[in-house]
Amino acid sequence: MMKFRFRRQGTDPQREKIKQELFAFNKTVEHGFPHQPSALAFDPKLQLMAIGTKSGAIKIYGAPGVEFTGLHKDTTAVTQIHFLPGQGRLLSLLDDNTIHLWEILSIINVPNFLSLSATRVTVLLLLKSCDLLCVGTEGGGVYFLEVPSLSLKDNQTLLQDQITHSLPEDYRCGKSLGPVEALQEHPQQSGKILIGYSRGLVVLWDLSTRLAEQLFLGKQQLESLVWERSGNLFVCSHNDGGYSVWAVTSGNTCNHQPVSSTIPYGPFPCKAISKILWRTTQAGSPVLLYSGGMPRASYGDRHCLTIQQDKDHVTLDFTSRVIDFFTVHSVEQEREFDEPSALVVLLEEELVVIDLQTPGWPSMPTPYLAPLHSSAITCSCHISSVPPKLWERLVNAGKAQQSRQHTHRVRSSLSWPICGGKNLAPPPKQQELLLTGHEDGTVRFWDASGVALTPLYKLSTANVFHTDCDPSDDPQDPSNDPDMQQEEEEWPPFRKVGCFDPYSDDPRLGIQKISLCKYSNKLVVAGTAGQVIVLGLSDERSDHLVDVSVVDLLYDREGFTWKGHDRLEPRSKPAPFPRWHCMPSRRTQSCDLIVCTLHPNDSLAMEGPLSRVKSLKKSLRQSFRRIRKSRVSGKKRTITTPTSKVQEANAALAEQEEVAPVQRRIEPRSADDSLSGVVRCVCFADTFLRDGTHHGPTLWAGTNSGSVYAYALEVPGVGSGRVCERGGASESSVCVEAVLGKEIQLMHRAPVVSICVLDGRGKPLPDPYEASQDLAIAPDMTNAHSVLIASEEQLKVFSLPKVSAKTKFKLTAHEGCRVRKVAMVVFSSTAQEDYSEHTLVCLTNLGDMHLFSIPALRPQVRYDCIRKEDISGIASCVFTKNGQGFYLISPSEYERFSLSAKVLTEPLCFGWLYGLILYQNIRANKYILNNFKNISVILTDLQHFPGPVYVPGRSLDTALKTTKLTVHYDFSCETKKMIILLLLLYYSIDCQSKWCMLVYVCPQRWYDNAASGQRNPQEPDGSG
């Protein structure tokens, strides 16, 4: 009978359905700059950019909000990427000598790939016809592959011996030509390619006759080649820091000397020019762009790219290595000039775009791919539902800041040049802010409302203090202005470009905590050296002295030696704060804002020796005993310990009898730890602490030793408060008295991670300011409150004001993990608009997410989110209030995820981007067909390339009678899909159209789920 009564109940179908409507885990988008980029490509027809990384990832970007990510099976570096222009396909070359063909269906790797194990591939060239791929190798041979099959054409292979026989005897000299360094197709005559060898030889090869049309006998080691648009000239760069211009004439087979040869930064030895571009303009003078070429002795360690046009000469000086670059220019065959509009430079740590149309060639702000790690990220904070007024003020402050930065330079008026695809995501219902604190003392504000993480504003706290590297008291000293220093330098004409700066002036400036009140516009920033700065948002720039108060938290510690950073001394002159005014701040010898340390002797004594175990089968006696032991009172109890070996053996035997075979035994922690008094978390709440009838403001503090202290706060009214003097402060201030009301000592002594007070309905109390200003739903103050305390090992709910244990969940004993992050999240239902639940979300040291109902603490779902080896990712995780989160997957990238089935921020794109090119033998992809709901069918004629047009509501019969159409269908079963495909196949054959395209409008994660065999939660089951 007893076994039946206490047997674990089965799952409730109704509850399981509610869970599916509330919870769903998805990794939605990656914010920031790709980690360790290694390759770059651009599709001038689709206006798309692709970036390959050393980890084997390929990321494609278009207009803001248009993003795709793909990953090779092997984590091998991507060395080259080439688009098939206008087709939504691309080729990738990996470091393991394999070539892969991709189709942009949310990046699906087509099974066609080739592995050349005989020799290493050095360069790829895709002909304009997109049907032939030229492969240059380290052995000097050139191979030709058919596209898209990637099959080798043996009869077209060009070996080095065939070229050597055509060379003059004096140039041959028994030396090898070296690897193939460059391949370029003739811009006007298809079927002719330039082949550049490392030794310096350049060959104009005719593919149709398989003969060398011209030989250009260079004597300097070759690095790169580029054609002039007319095809009458080409330029090659060399490893001595120079470049040569060669003329292509029909009557001369061998050319011994170039038209001109220049070493721009000579005559002293220079580094190699790794890549060069030549772009023609209608103005007359071409634009020459090349990377490298700096004098070895003076500037050999700089990462530079030079732009030259007539007398204009600028050397862009970057803080990280140049990976690759390209220009956005006209590619239409009928155009006479290139007319470059923008230069896009991929660096190792950031992306830089230069406006080539505006005089002075200014840099452009990037709407995405901003380097989050311009200075190392030390902390982060998310603000949801930002009020419109605060948002507008932040946006205006950011625009004003950009205007000040371009005071001495011309500002770019060019629109963002990488604008392919169309973002179909609806505008965000609310604005979201992501605040990041950095090692250099800056706080950066990011627009996290959509897919693109856009920078809004940067706040620097370094101008408030004296630093080790800046002894000057005047932050506006002209001698410290880098712009003034640059003007003094004459040659080379360097210009600092980019915002990546890995060096910090002073390690004490590092930001450790950020808190922003979105209603009062107050920002609190805490730093490594114990500085706490309180700022208020202002509409105008302000220069004023900062009020300083010194709080010594170690005044009663005799014999204690502080081993941390020294204090930062404030500047004696007014500090400039654009759009912010600094309020009275505090400097402490620690980095916590409210409470820093508590003496270990302040903790309550343990109630007795405890061996924490998990038991699935407990007798009623054991259960009631544990309930009594969990009740916490203010009385200190003496610690009773066995005094004899017999008692110790009996106690050990009793403990062993209580432990079930599936239980985990957790040893109690020592109370003598020197860090036991460190405060881990604080919480303000308006609740019942002294009795059940009177509530008031309280402060809760949890420590490293499992102690929780609850203080009743006496907040005086304005003008009636007690005035006290702060040590080191010049002004008096009103004091808030804190009276200790309750002390809770958790028996396991695990560090307290989070404290949250629940109202009478079991919901978290709103923020005190929100409640006082009627900005949130009023909490239930009629029924008894409770407090939820989360330690590293368990979750526990106590009633208030009696402080008696109500329920708990031993996470470590059950799951063998420890709590690292805790958040209270509101999950909304996808089925009922007015239904939502407050849920406790726990991130553990194993990287998994546990969701619990409150206040009952019943486990709901569990998701694997972060790899357990990714310690920095777990430590950097931050949750939003609506069920999303961010964590660092690299120093420069945030992974965004969602635990909510309703709230998702993910790419939703339309246009040629989500296209599967289907030739006359339409290839149906089983995974794709089974994993979407909405399809737009677009039939176009290749000769009249109109682009897709969305025309909803047209019937299939009407649509098939036209040559250019768009039809929108809602598929719910496989039969309808196959009917449509058969009709499309019949239509394409009957009308002899060159191609047709299926455009899928669905989130990228659906494709990822399809590839892994998972079913999407929104996908219909196909019934009916």
Image (spheres, rainbow, N blue to C red):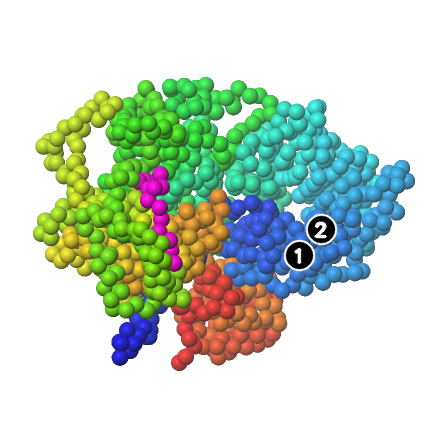
Q: Where does the image place residue 910, in percent across and percent down from the top left?
A: 46, 59
Q: Where does the image place residue 977, in percent across and percent down from the top left?
A: 49, 75
Q: Where does the image place residue 117, in percent across and percent down from the top left?
A: 73, 56
Above or below: residue 159 compared with residue 485: below
Residue visible at 57% across and 21% down? 490
Residue 816 lies left or right of residue 619; in this view the side is: right
| Residue 849 painted magenta | no
Report the front residue among 637 and 339: 637
- Return the residue at label 2: 121
Are there few (<14), some (14-19), or many (20+) residues within 10 Å of tag 2?
many
Which amino acid, mark 1? Ile
- Return the residue at label 1: 99
Are there few (<14), some (14-19), or many (20+) residues within 10 Å of tag 1?
many
Which amino acid, mark 2? Val
Report the front residue among 188 and 861: 861
Q: Earlier in the sequence, mark 1 or mark 2?
A: 1
Report the front residue among 764 and 573: 764
Q: Looking at the rendering, in which quadrant would you find the N terminus?
A: bottom left
Residue numbers of the magenta segment = 665-678
